[in-house]
Amino acid sequence: MSCNNEETEPSLPNSPSYRDGIYSGKQLEFSVDGKETMTVSSVTLTSRLLDANLDPDKDPDQIAHPSDPTYTTTVSIAGFPLEGDKSSFVTVSNIMGFKGTTMIQNIEYEYVGEFTGDPLSHHENKGLILKLTTK
C-alpha cells in the first residue's frame, strides 16, 4: 500500500454530450447561405466535457454555471462541400447548440448549430439544424 501526500486536482471524466451522435434524414437540416444543401448525408458530433466549462456565448475567459455544461465538439459533415467530401471542425457547444467561424477548403464560414428535441430523450427524437454562411 502506498501513500501520496501531494495534493492533486481532480480531473473531469471524458464525458460525452447528450447531443452526440449521427444526425441524418429527418433529424438534420443543413443549409449554406440560406439554401438547403442536398449533398450532405449526415453530420456526426463527438464531444468531450471542457475542463474549464467555458460558455460558448460569452468571452472564453468566463466560467459557466455547472448546470449548463460546455463541451469541445468535433462536427464532421459527410457530403460537404461536394458529394463524397468530408469536412470537419471543432467548436464549443452546450446542450442548446454552438456557433462560431471555421475555414473549409479555404472558404471562411460563420456557422450556427441548433439542437431540437429534449437532450435526455432517445437520439431518434433529437435533431440538428446547422446553418453555414459564407463570410
Image (tube, grey):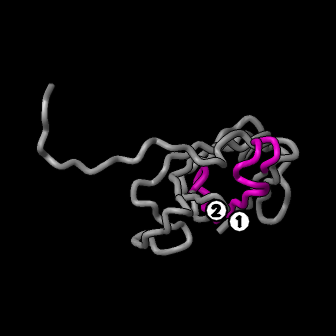
Q: Quadrant of the C terminus?
A: bottom right
Task: Find the distance from the CA under tag 1 to the CA under tag 2.
Answer: 5 Å
Q: What residue sits 82% from the left and 65% below the top? A: 34
| Left or right: 29 as drawn, with respect to 135 | right
Question: Which label belongs to residue 133?
Answer: 1
Q: Which residue is mark 2?
A: 109
Q: Quadrant of residue 129?
A: bottom right
Please name the residue shown 76% across and 42% down the image: 122
Q: Position of residue 42 (x, y in %)?
A: 75, 41
Q: Position of residue 132 (x, y in %)?
A: 71, 61
> Magenta span covers which residues?
103-126
Amino acid on which disc 1 is placed: Thr
In the rendered structure, does residue 88 fall within the stretch colored magenta?
no
Q: Nearer the viewer, residue 81 or 5?
A: 5
The kind of secondary structure element at disc 2 is strand
The picture places residue 8, in percent across and down from the top left corner, at: 22, 48
Q: Amino acid at mark 2?
A: Tyr
Q: Residue furthest top?
A: 1
Magenta residue check for 114: yes
Split into 4 quadrants, where in the image is the N terminus? top left
Q: Residues within 10 Å of mark 2 (few under 14, many from 20)?
A: some
Q: Earlier in the sequence, mark 1 or mark 2?
A: 2
Residue at (79%, 40%) from the top-left corner? 41
Say if mark 1 contacts mark 2, CB within 8 Å: yes
Left or right: 65 in relation to 115? left
